Amino acid sequence: MNAHLTATARVAAHTIVVFVTVFVFATFITFALQGLSGLSPAYLQLGESATPEQVAALEHAWGLDRPFLVQYADWFAGILRGDLGESWYNGASIAGLLASRAAISLSVAGLALTIGIVFGFGLGALAAAFPTSPLDRAITGFTTLISVMPAFVVGIALVAVLAVGLGWFPSAGYVPIARGGVSGWLWHLWLPAIALSLDTVADLARQMRVGLIQAGRENYVTGALMRGLGPQRIFFGHVLRNGSGPALTVLGMKFPALLGGAVVTEAIFGLAGFGKFAADSAARGDVPAVQGVLVVAILLVVVFNLIVNLLLVRLNPAASRGV
C-alpha cells in the first residue's frame, strides 16, 4: 500500500511539474500573439481615423507601451488571480464573459465525453469478449464507419432528420438547468453531443478491444486460471485493469479534440459557447479575449490529463515505473 501511494505521489508530482511548465510556456506563446498580431485597442475603440496622438494615449492607458516581459508578468499574475484582463472591444471583464459561456461548451463537451466513454469502452469490451466473431466484426465495421464521419456532417444530418424531420429534438439553442431543469437541459444537448462524440467512441472502442485482447493473453491470466479464479474476478481484477491503459491514454488526447470540435458544432446548433466567442473575438481583432479562451482551454486540457494520468496509475501501478 505504501509503495502504491508513493508511486501515485511520484506520478502526481511529475505531472504537476509538467503541467506548470506547459502552462507557463503555453501562456507565454499565447501572450506573444498580441505583439505578433500588430493589433491595437485604439483602432477598435477610436476607429481607423484615430490620430497617432490618440492611439499613443490609449495604448499608454492600456499599458501597451511597456516592455513585453513586464506586460506578460502582469498578465500572468492576473491569470493566477483569475483575472483574464479586459476586452478591447467593450472593456468588459473577459473572465466574466467566458463564465457565461463556460456552462454551454463544457456541457456539450462533458456529455460528448460521457457518451464516448460509455459506448467506446462498452463496445470495445464487447468486441474483445468475442474476438473474430460476427459481433466483433460488426462492431469493428461500425466504429470504422463513424470514425470517418466529420462532426459537422453528422450534426447537419441529425438536425435534418431528428430535429426538422421528426421533431424529436430542438434544432438549435441552449437551455440552462436553472430555467429548463435537467430534462430541458439535456434535450438541447443530445444532438450536438452525439455529433461531437462519434470519433471518441470509435477510437476508445478500438483501443479498448486491442488492449483487452492483449491483456487476456498475458501469463498472469494463465496463472490466475490455474489458481482457480473465476472469469469475472480475472476480468475485473487483471484483464480490465491492465488492458484499459491504451484506451485511457487515448481518452486524455481526445479531450482537446472535443473542445476544438465545439467551434464547428456550436455554429451548427446555434450555441453561444467558447467556440463562437473565440470566433467572434478573432473577427473583431479582440486579442485579449482570444487569449482568454486559449488560457481556459489550456487549463482544462492539462487538468483533464492530470486526472487521466492519476487514474492510469490507480488502475495499473506498473504505469508509474517509467516516471
Image (cartoon, grey):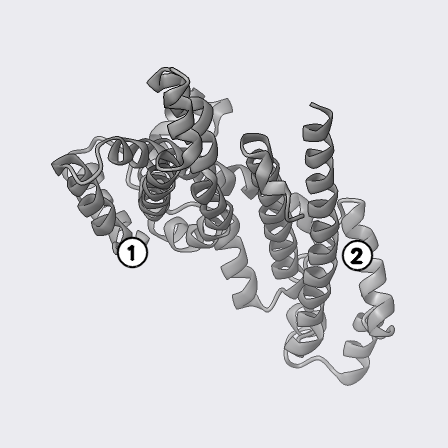
* Residue marked by disc 2: 76
Q: Earlier in the sequence, mark 2 or mark 1?
A: 2
Give the number of the disc on residue 234: none
* In the depicted structure, whether residue 209 falls above or below residue 92: above
Question: For this view, does 315 lie left or right of residue 91?
Answer: left
Q: Is residue 61 visible?
A: no
Amino acid type at mark 1: Pro
Amino acid type at mark 2: Phe
Q: CA distance from mark 2 to mark 1?
A: 36 Å
* In the depicted structure, whether residue 4 falls above or below residue 75: above
Pinpoint residue 126: horizontal percent, then vertical percent.
26, 31
Please name whichever residue, 235 or 52, is drawn nearer the observer in this view of the structure: 235
Please name whichever residue, 303 or 274, is drawn nearer the observer in this view of the structure: 303
* In the depicted structure, whether residue 200 falls above or below residue 110: below
Disc 2 crowd, CA 10 A, few/some/many (<14, 14-19, 20+) = some
Tell me what residue is drawn at x 77 percent, y 77 percent: 55
Pinpoint residue 170: horizontal percent, then vertical percent.
29, 35
Tell me what residue is drawn at x 21 percent, y 30 percent: 168
* Residue marked by disc 1: 150
Which of the 4 image quarters holds residue 166? top left
Pinpoint residue 193: horizontal percent, then vertical percent.
36, 40
Q: Is residue 291 visible?
A: yes
